[in-house]
Image (cartoon, grey):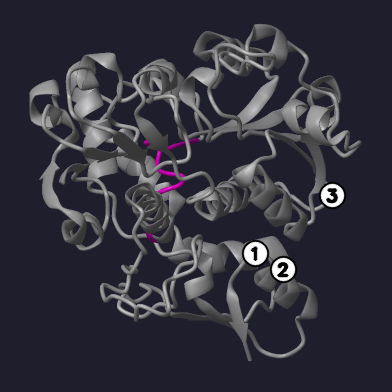
């Protein structure tokens, strides 16, 4: 059994080496020649798995440790009889924490409060559900739009897109990228979309770059329909447009889902899928030790911290006296995830040469620093702040007296 795995898969060695002859390659090195005699291929979204790569190879299984599948030619894989899997939901919590950090940052930077504002969430799948929860914890009024779920569930909570565009003070996109079918999302945020916004919206795209028409976004910024913007994904990435970058208040290199836990859970989910494909019982966990034969790790669960890296910020002690709740929350969130540092790193590579810009983007993703999720940080407040304590808990922090 020969397995080819991309270098950007955490714990690839520990997870897949016991299953066969493992070769770990940089995504650019995974070519048709290198996979010709491989049986299994494990990648992330930086590599396209299609006919050009796989035709004539022995590959019978392709796993992507990401939530999206737009880099997989699913029609070809199905036609060729190649089993495939993704890792839906693996980084959903990471993206929702990114949204929290972005909104708190913008609120403090521009002097507005989130409490009582209306957020429109377009796409309420694994990620969108988490964003709903976090938005409610911040005191936002939440409107949800998800046509596929509305059709399947007939749930009135899913509202027409027109209502969200007309009412939302904040609009955030969490859709997959599709060009066909009843609900295509390619350039969903087009000129007409932005024209229907109420003036002065805060706009976030952490979905896929091409779900937003870049020229339409620039026009919306020029007219004031969009007052603030947070962009994590970009049309044509890894190359990003500098004119679009200049109009983003917060700009990051497609790392909203790059918490350590989000990336590791992607590996866990693909590992379980490989074990199912091979008909064997999973025994590996991210603790880098096998569990006893009688106690395999339930699918979809991360172990306790165990042998995973310790949290960089294990505890925060804060006296919120004199601070608004949102200012206090920003002082808690920022040490755990400094979203402005990600913004600075991307802008540092905004050079004229598109090739260099693209390489900078890819290097930022490849060498992304470890970012632990909120739950690994304990927050300690003095007594007498029950509302703030509730928000801290609802955002996912470990709150203790």
On the question of residue 352 being in view, the answer is: no
Q: Nearer the viewer, mark 3 or mark 1?
A: 1
Where is mark 1, residue-wise? 395
Residue at image position (72%, 55%) is 133
In the image, residue 5 sits, relative to residue 30, either above or below, namely below
In the image, residue 112 sits, relative to residue 358, either above or below, namely below
Main secondary structure along the magenta-highlighted residues: loop
Position of 109 with respect to 283 (left or right) is: right
Where is mark 3, residue-wise? 116
Quadrant housing residue 399: bottom right
Verify CB contact (< 8 Å) between mark 3 and mark 2.
no
Q: Quadrant of the C terminus?
A: bottom right
Residue 28: give x, y in percent of width and height: 15, 29
On the question of residue 32 being in view, the answer is: yes
Position of 316 with respect to 199 (left or right) is: left
Tell me which segment is drawn in magenta: 250-260
In magenta stretch: residue 86: no
Instruction: Provide the secondary structure element on which disc 1 rests.
Output: loop
Query: How many C-alpha atoms fall within 10 Å of the one at disc 1: few (<14), some, or many (≥20)?
Result: many
Where is mark 2, residue-wise? 391
Q: CA distance from mark 3 to mark 2?
A: 14 Å
Residue at image position (45%, 68%) is 302
Among the two numbered marks 3 and 2 on one chain, the one whose residue lies closer to the N terminus = 3
Verify CB contact (< 8 Å) between mark 1 and mark 2.
yes
In magenta stretch: residue 253: yes
Residue 165: give x, y in percent of width and height: 79, 24
Residue at image position (70%, 14%) is 193
Instruction: Provide the secondary structure element on which disc 3 rests.
Output: loop
Q: CA distance from mark 3 to mark 1?
A: 17 Å
**What is the residue that sits farthest to the right in this orientation?**
156
Instruction: Provide the secondary structure element on which disc 2 rests.
Output: helix
């Amino acid at each position: 059994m020969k397995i080819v795995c991309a270098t950007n898969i955490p714990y690839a060695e520990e997870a897949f080496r016991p299953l066969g002859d493992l070769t770990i390659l940089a995504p650019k090195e995974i070519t048709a020649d290198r996979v010709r005699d491989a049986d299994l291929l494990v990648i992330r979204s930086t590599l396209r798995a299609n006919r050009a790569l796989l035709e004539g190879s022995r590959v019978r299984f392709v796993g992507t440790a990401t939530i999206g599948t737009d880099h997989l030619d699913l029609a070809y894989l199905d036609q060729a009889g190649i089993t495939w899997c993704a890792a839906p939901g693996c980084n959903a919590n990471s993206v929702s924490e990114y949204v929290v950090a972005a909104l708190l940052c913008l609120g403090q930077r521009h002097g507005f409060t989130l409490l009582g504002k209306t957020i429109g969430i377009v796409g309420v799948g694994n990620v969108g559900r988490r964003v709903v929860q976090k938005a409610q914890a911040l005191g936002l009024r939440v409107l949800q739009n998800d046509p596929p779920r509305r059709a399947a569930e007939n749930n009135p909570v899913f509202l027409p897109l027109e209502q969200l565009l007309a009412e939302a003070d904040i609009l955030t996109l969490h859709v997959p990228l599709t060009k066909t079918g009843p609900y295509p999302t390619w350039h969903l945020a087009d000129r007409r979309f932005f024209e229907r916004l109420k003036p002065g919206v805060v706009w976030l795209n952490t979905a896929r770059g091409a779900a937003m028409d870049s020229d339409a976004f620039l026009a919306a910024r020029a007219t004031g329909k969009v007052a603030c913007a947070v962009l994590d994904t970009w049309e044509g990435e890894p190359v990003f447009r500098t004119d679009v970058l200049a109009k983003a208040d917060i700009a990051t290199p497609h790392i909203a889902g790059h918490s350590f836990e989000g990336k590791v859970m992607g590996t866990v989910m693909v590992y379980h899928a490989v074990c199912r494909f091979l008909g064997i019982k999973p025994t590996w966990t991210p603790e880098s030790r096998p569990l006893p034969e009688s106690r395999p790790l339930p699918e979809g669960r991360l172990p306790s911290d165990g042998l995973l890296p310790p949290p960089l910020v294990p505890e925060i002690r804060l006296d919120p006296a004199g601070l608004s709740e949102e200012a206090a929350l920003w002082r808690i969130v920022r040490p755990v995830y400094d979203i402005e540092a990600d913004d600075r790193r991307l802008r540092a590579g905004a050079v004229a040469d598109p090739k260099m810009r693209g390489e900078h983007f890819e290097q930022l993703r490849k060498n992304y620093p470890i970012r632990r999720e909120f739950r690994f940080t304990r927050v300690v407040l003095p007594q007498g702040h029950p509302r703030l304590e509730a928000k801290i808990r609802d955002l996912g922090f470990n709150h203790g007296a």
